[in-house]
């Protein structure tokens, strides 16, 4: 199981990459434009922060397969081998995924709303598929059910494609998606921190420290 940061904010990526077990960074066009920086410089800066060994996901803009393939090759050539190209699951996208996979360029099929979108993208050769849990919930639909059905299809048919469940708005959705069988998740920096934040933990830590300092003095902040 791997945990990705769904953001292009350098400060937040640097912080989380230092403190949390982060496997890489996922972006989309909306996430990139939010940072108001030339996008290639920004992507290179993200790579500098996380290192070449972690994955960086970059999405194409074109909606024709030929344009997607050209963009994918451009991104691939200008960044590094650990870049994964995000391609939406349209007919044109599936065509692009087939061609890029045959060319050993790794892809993630994005904007997944149904189990069959995930299955067809996997058959086309996508390395990853990204079901949009919260956006499915808002349709309304059941994002976690889609995760569970994709997990079941991949396992029953021995597909090596992995899921990176995405588009979360709260920790419960993340927990439910993990229990439903997603291998990986991507979440906003705020949600990643919320995964482990608990007021009871903070209270316990303060009480342990107060007991220690009562016995050994207020300056005694460590056991050394
Ligand atoms: C990730 O790959 C998606 O682009 C992202 O998670 C969408 O999230 P949102 O629904 O919060 O915009």
Image: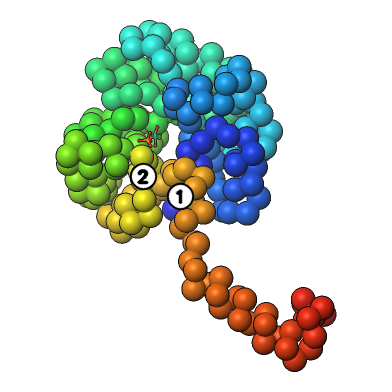
On residue 31, which mark appears?
A: none
Left or right: 96, with 19 as reference point: left
Question: SS at mark 2?
Answer: loop
Left or right: 100, with 153 as reference point: right
Residue 221 position, x and y percent, is 77, 76
The answer to which quarter of the image holds residue 65 is top left
- Is label 2 within 8 A of ligand 1 (CB to nearest ligand atom)? yes
Q: CA distance from mark 2 to mark 1?
A: 8 Å
Label 1 sits on residue: 191
For marks 2 and 1 on the same chain, the one whose residue lies earlier in the sequence: 2
Label 2: few (<14), some or many (≥20) within 10 Å?
Answer: many
- In the image, farthest residue toward the bottom: 215
Label 2 sits on residue: 168
Residue 163 position, x and y percent, is 35, 42
Q: Is residue 17 above or below residue 73?
A: below
Residue 109 position, x and y percent, is 34, 29
Question: Where's the C terminus, which quadrant?
Answer: bottom right
Q: Quadrant of ligand 1?
A: top left
């Amino acid at each position: 199981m791997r945990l990705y940061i769904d953001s292009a904010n350098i400060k937040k990526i640097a912080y989380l990459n230092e403190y949390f077990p982060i496997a890489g960074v996922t972006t989309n066009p909306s996430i990139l434009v939010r940072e108001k920086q030339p996008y290639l410089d920004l992507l290179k800066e993200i790579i500098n922060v996380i290192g070449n060994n972690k994955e960086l996901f970059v999405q194409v803009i074109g909606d024709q397969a030929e344009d997607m393939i050209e963009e994918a090759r451009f991104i691939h050539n200008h960044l590094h081998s650990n870049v994964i190209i995000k391609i939406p699951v349209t007919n044109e996208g599936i065509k692009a995924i087939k061609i890029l996979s045959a060319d050993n360029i790794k892809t993630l099929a994005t904007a997944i709303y149904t189990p069959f979108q995930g299955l067809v993208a996997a058959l086309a050769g996508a390395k990853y598929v990204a079901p949009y849990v919260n956006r499915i919930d808002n349709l309304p639909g059941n994002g976690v059910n889609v995760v569970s059905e994709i997990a079941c299809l991949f396992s029953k048919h021995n597909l090596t494609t992995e899921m990176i469940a995405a588009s979360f708005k709260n920790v419960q959705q993340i927990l439910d998606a993990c229990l439903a069988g997603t291998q990986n998740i991507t979440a906003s920096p705020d949600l990643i921190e919320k995964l482990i934040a608990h007021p009871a933990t903070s209270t316990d830590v303060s009480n342990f420290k107060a007991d220690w300092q009562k016995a050994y003095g207020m300056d005694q902040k460590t056991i050394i």
